[in-house]
Each structure stands twice: as C-alpha cells, then as structure tokens.
Image (cartoon, rainbow, N blue to C red):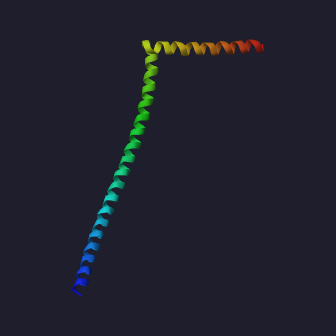
Amino acid sequence: MQDSNQRVVDLEKNVVLLLNKLKDNHYAIESLQAQLAQSTQQCSTLEADNNALKKENESLAVANSLLGSNKSNATTKHKINALIQQIDACIDQLHQMA
C-alpha cells in the first residue's frame, strides 16, 4: 500500500513539474511572439528607409549629372543623343506624312 501511495506522490510531483514547464513554455512563446512582432516592425521600417534612400540616391545622381561630373557626362551625352535620334525619327515621320 505504501508503495502505491509513493507512486501517486511521485506522479503528482511529475504532473506539477510538467505544468510548471508548460507555463514556462507558454511565457517563452509569448515572449518570442512579441519579439517577432517587433522584428517585423523593424524590418518594415528599414525597408521603407531603404526605399527612401534609393530614391534620394537617384535624385542625387540626376543632380550630379546636371552639375557635370565626369562620370555622368558620358551618361548624359548618351541620353541626349538618344533623345535627338528620337526627335529626328519623329521629324522624318512628319515629313513622310506631309
């Protein structure tokens, strides 16, 4: 009889230990979910900042090309030449219509 009582006591201890572990796991899951939400928010913020910086970089590249930096001079010349060719093609089409 005493042996079965001891087994019941041991089982009760094990149940209590398991319940404590379950509670600890629940708190850990809540903490991880909060961290995930915070990380997701940070990721969104960083992505928005990155997009804003890309747009600013493009604007600065255009400004540099207008100021005449050596690197952008070639690019600007190519763009101007392409525009001139398009204008010439339009003029030719207008002459053919007339």
x and y, in percent, of residue 30 in the image: 34, 59
Task: Determine whether, in the image, residue 55 is placed left or right of residue 15.
Answer: right
Numbered label tally: 0
Quadrant containing the N terminus in the rendered view: bottom left
Q: Quadrant of residue 82?
A: top right
Which residue is nearer to you in this view: 40 or 17? 17
Image height check: is 55 above or below 86?
A: below
In the picture shown, does residue 46 fall above or below 56?
below
Residue under the point 44% across and 21% down: 61
Picture coordinates of residue 39, whole percent (x, y): 36, 47
Q: Quadrant of the C terminus?
A: top right
97 displayed left or right of 29: right
Residue that protrudes farthest toward the right in the picture: 98
Looking at this view, is 8 or 80 the one in front? 8
In the displayed structure, 82 sits above or below 36; it is: above
Q: Residue at x 45, y 30 (%)?
A: 55
Q: Residue 64 falls in which quadrant of the image?
A: top left
**How far across and down, in percent of the image, does residue 7 sit?**
26, 80
Measured from the top left, where is residue 2 in percent x and y?
A: 21, 85
